Amino acid sequence: MTLTGPAPTGLTGSPDRSRLLDVLARRQPGRSLPGECYTDEALHRLDLDLLWSRQWVFVGSVAEVPEAGDYLTVDIGSVSVMVLRDDDEQVAAFRNVCRHRGARLVDETHGSVGNIVCGYHRWTYGTDGRLLHAPQLAPGTDLSCLGLRKVALRVVGGLVFVCLAADPPGDIDDVAALVEPYLAPHALERTKVAAQVDLVEDGNWKLTMENNRECYHCDGHPELLCTFFPTWGLEEHQVPARLRPAHDRYLLAETDLELACEQRGIPFRAVEDLVDRPVGFRVQREALDGAGESFSRDGSRLVGRLLGDLDEPRLGRATFHAQPNVWAHFLADHVVTFAVLPVAVDRTLVRTTWLVHEDAQEGVDYDVEALTEVWKHTNEQDAAFVGLTQRGVSDPTYEPGPYTEPERQVDAFVTWYVDRMREEAGR
Amino acid sequence: MTLTGPAPTGLTGSPDRSRLLDVLARRQPGRSLPGECYTDEALHRLDLDLLWSRQWVFVGSVAEVPEAGDYLTVDIGSVSVMVLRDDDEQVAAFRNVCRHRGARLVDETHGSVGNIVCGYHRWTYGTDGRLLHAPQLAPGTDLSCLGLRKVALRVVGGLVFVCLAADPPGDIDDVAALVEPYLAPHALERTKVAAQVDLVEDGNWKLTMENNRECYHCDGHPELLCTFFPTWGLEEHQVPARLRPAHDRYLLAETDLELACEQRGIPFRAVEDLVDRPVGFRVQREALDGAGESFSRDGSRLVGRLLGDLDEPRLGRATFHAQPNVWAHFLADHVVTFAVLPVAVDRTLVRTTWLVHEDAQEGVDYDVEALTEVWKHTNEQDAAFVGLTQRGVSDPTYEPGPYTEPERQVDAFVTWYVDRMREEAGR
Amino acid sequence: MTLTGPAPTGLTGSPDRSRLLDVLARRQPGRSLPGECYTDEALHRLDLDLLWSRQWVFVGSVAEVPEAGDYLTVDIGSVSVMVLRDDDEQVAAFRNVCRHRGARLVDETHGSVGNIVCGYHRWTYGTDGRLLHAPQLAPGTDLSCLGLRKVALRVVGGLVFVCLAADPPGDIDDVAALVEPYLAPHALERTKVAAQVDLVEDGNWKLTMENNRECYHCDGHPELLCTFFPTWGLEEHQVPARLRPAHDRYLLAETDLELACEQRGIPFRAVEDLVDRPVGFRVQREALDGAGESFSRDGSRLVGRLLGDLDEPRLGRATFHAQPNVWAHFLADHVVTFAVLPVAVDRTLVRTTWLVHEDAQEGVDYDVEALTEVWKHTNEQDAAFVGLTQRGVSDPTYEPGPYTEPERQVDAFVTWYVDRMREEAGR
């Protein structure tokens, strides 16, 4: 299999790269990025060329392509990627571009095909990407040179990552080994999509990621706070007196959860390597407030049928985060994944997907409105925060302020971003 | 008459031109253009500056300005051109810009004026462009220096072409001599507009032109295929067995048509010079399927009154194509013209105009819905193809694939484009 | 108080500045600006960086922030400015940007706050801009370095000007001394907002200003011409015969007005310094046609309660104009202010505000529809003129034509613009 990296584009030559390095040099530890990183068109093209085209990008889960011929598509900048389950039931990815005159092959976010037939001139490809038929092609043309361009793909615990580069970062195997034990009990391969919502936020993708990396703003999420402990992200000494009762409840719930996990051989403690590797990640199981089962108003389960072979609904949430673009919560009764995809320098798509056991029946085992309520509201609240921040950092005199301790992971994300961009700009 | 070419613009200096030449050098014969040619803003500005501002551009027909004072306007990039029938019944063209403070003079696509009066400060020009009156202008100002700027204009068989350059390509006279015998029997000067539809396609103008230059995709045009022979564009040896009956029908219809043309002294065979001259063109008369008369579901005529002095409805279509931006079909009962005009790097206006005999009565001799049905559907189908292609070629790894034999004229168009751009970039 | 100027931006380096100087060098006295000045994105960024970020900009009046805690916001390019009446009843201005992660603090054009609380993470500032509270900020952080960034502000006769530069032009004090005697009798500080309308014109901000500086186009303003004398802007020798009766009426009204002003110690004659200073301005009291009191169909007053301590409704209009972005009419019964704010190279916000005595009662003393009718129509007519001009000057062959004598102030504005841009580009 030959993978093809992006061609050099005339738009992103050395003047923009030196400017990028100058801007990154102005970033101070413990503070956010200079405003240009969120607002400048040329720097955004470098984000696409140097980061999104070279890192592993989350695109969805195996549950979105359950049968042979099922596909999903995502846009990474101007690149459309088609993720397809082939006739051998393997999941693979291709550039969604006909090898003839370049028409996009499929135009929906999800669908199903027998072969992949270009709508323009009927060039026909197998689900393995081989060109099977092209009408009236000159005799002697070597069809084997005209197969769809493959895109590197790796499944981690049912989550699908692709990489547009010819030489994807190799450490995803190490990350998979560390993360899969946390995700495996939820058996993503035996789930189905209960709901999917696309929300476009009016801000740069990094603001969306930074927003997600702290709960310092969680006063703005009343629905989420029904089950998120209000002391999330605080060190022991940081807990204010008014939150002491909630924190004691949290400590007790954590003890209970640890025991339940030990009894079932499910890993529990945080594993994190956010800065020093291409696939910056974090995974941990944490207790939820209230009944401790799911993202409902009282914390009780939202789906009657539990995932995989789980026998206990009160397992909190295993939360997985990977850079540049995913976080996901794995609960006993459902999984919710979030894919962050850049649309423009100041617009970002957040695709949220709720997954339930493949045998769960809508209307019997779960109600879609109830299942999706908390995160729909939370996403909209976050979109408003991101929009306000995008507009504020556009002021040319904006100077990043200091992070507080609850923003430790934001700092880690920003540091990871700066390191990756420096590495890639220097290649 | 002094014609004025475009001023040099600071935006399109030598770095962009060298990049253009680099990109054009990557084009391989028999394949489409590199993706940047369709997606890059700076290259699009060079299309406007080096091609659209220097070649002859189709803007409409004499039938759209039937009376003295009637005008039409088209936008060629940021330039609005006003085509006007003057008080001597001659058709002329002007920049649609007041010589005072630059207000656009007329703001509709079609209209009628006595004099041309700027709405801002009432500066008043004759239909010959001379400044007749400007209130309170300083005494002694030489009005003769403040007439409207003329634009070169040439009528070919009733089709109106303009050229924004001061030194328009001279070969349009040769082309006119070759083409007019095909168009003259349809007497465009004795037609009227029955309908006009503006459609904006979400793709670069070159994709719109390439789409039109082949019927390799005509399976996607069910309405058009009622009268387009399905073997259009195929050489004898390329006709597949399943299309043999249709092809035999085609050969018979061609023989019939040739005879009918000979009897009436109407030229029939293809004349084509698509690559080697500024006004790349092709003209030919071809049979239609079914009744062979018009673009209807069964091929029978759509307008009772035939054009000019024609006495025979079954005359197929004389098809005229000229680069960069026009194709038109001349039938016994009507003419349909297509003007392609760039709106943005990824948006293109297609203006379709149906013309019938000036004495034909709507509701009696023709029905507008029936007259326009086939090409309305066909245009929308083509717009979808163009949109898919625009999005696909935006992938930076897109490499143009090989043209097939039915795409010979697409190859010719692209070669013409490359040659013209190289010539103009080197001036 | 430390004021902070805009950071240098990588986008507006020396190539754009030399191009600007080249374009400005092409401007001929007595003619408008070259077309690029209105249409070129890079030159527009220089307008923002070199002019809007360095000159005094009108943002509204003290009547828009009547109580402590009341604020208004305006966008100057990508900069949002918050104008606030503080707890000591002083009006001050801040960058509308949180010092933490840059969120915009307030998102409405008008509102009221106790403290200024960032919606994102609850950082809380006093109305004096000091950071009062930031949850969980690292111990020892110096809050005094994290106050809101102040913006220079100056009130002139109740009109509020801000300057984004650290070293605002000092001549505003001289201008204030000259202008305030004209405005003071109208007592803006004792008015309230009766109506405010935002209109976005599809043209460059300079076209909006140029349009306002002449009545050569006033034939296009039928409502305004009820009270604007049709010979406005004409020298005695320029009055055409057909306008002689109107001009005689004008001369008589001026004599009456001068007398009424002298009796009350209100200044009357024009004071103007449009070109040679940073705060180019003009102020004058002029008679109105008809009843001579207000902008109504017959010239009679629109508000029963007169402004300040005025005892006479027939006082014409004191008209104040300052560059780059304001004009305002002060009548006996109301004031109407116009703020011009650039939105994009080809889009401009005109915010019109009608102010009446703070004790005037809607429905009793005035009717909002009647009060706003003339200028609503006039603004819409002007927006159409500006839109037509924007599209016309986009033609690269547009060459500015000669101004007529009634366009003297347009010439002055353009000359002021060229001088300011040259000064600033050379700093």
Image: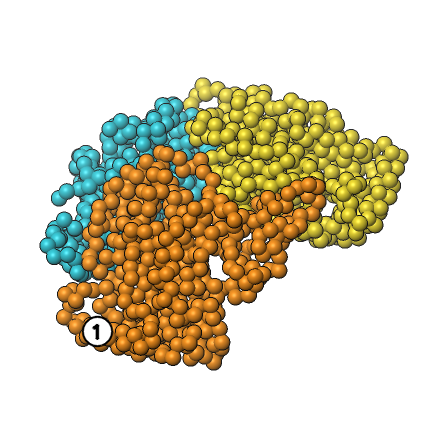
Chain colours: A yellow, B cyan, C orange
Q: Is residue A66 left or right of residue B287?
A: right
The kind of secondary structure element at disc 1 is helix
Taking the spot 43% from the left edge, 46% from the top edge, the residue there is: C167
Tell me if residue B99 can be seen: no
Residue B80 % position (x, y)? 28, 48
Q: In this view of the protein, can residue C251 be seen by the observer?
A: yes
Q: Which corner quadrant holds the C terminus of chain B?
A: top left
x, y percent for residue C118:
62, 51
In the picture, the quarter occupied by the N terminus of chain B is top left
Q: Nearer the viewer, residue C296 or A123?
A: C296
**Disc 1 residue type?**
Leu
Relative to A86, is A209 above or below?
below
Tag 1 subunit: C
Residue sitting at 50 percent across and 24 percent down? Answer: A146
The answer to which of C45 and B383 lies nearer the viewer is: C45
Q: Position of residue A121 (x, y in %)?
A: 46, 34
Near-viewer residue (B385 or B8): B8
Which residue is denoted by mark 1 in the rendering?
Answer: C251
In the picture, measured across the screen, residue C375 lies left or right of residue B175, that is right
Q: Is residue A129 left or right of residue C410?
A: right
The mark total stands at: 1
- How packed mark 1 is, by other alpha carbons closer than 10 Å (few <14, some 14-19, many 20 or more), is few
Q: Position of residue A347 (x, y in %)?
A: 54, 43
Compare residues A427 and A316 and report the one nearer the observer. Answer: A427
Q: Residue at x 87, y 34 (%)?
A: A262
* Left or right of residue A99: residue B420: left
Above or below, B189 relative to A24: below
Residue depicted at 35% across the width and 62% down the height? C179
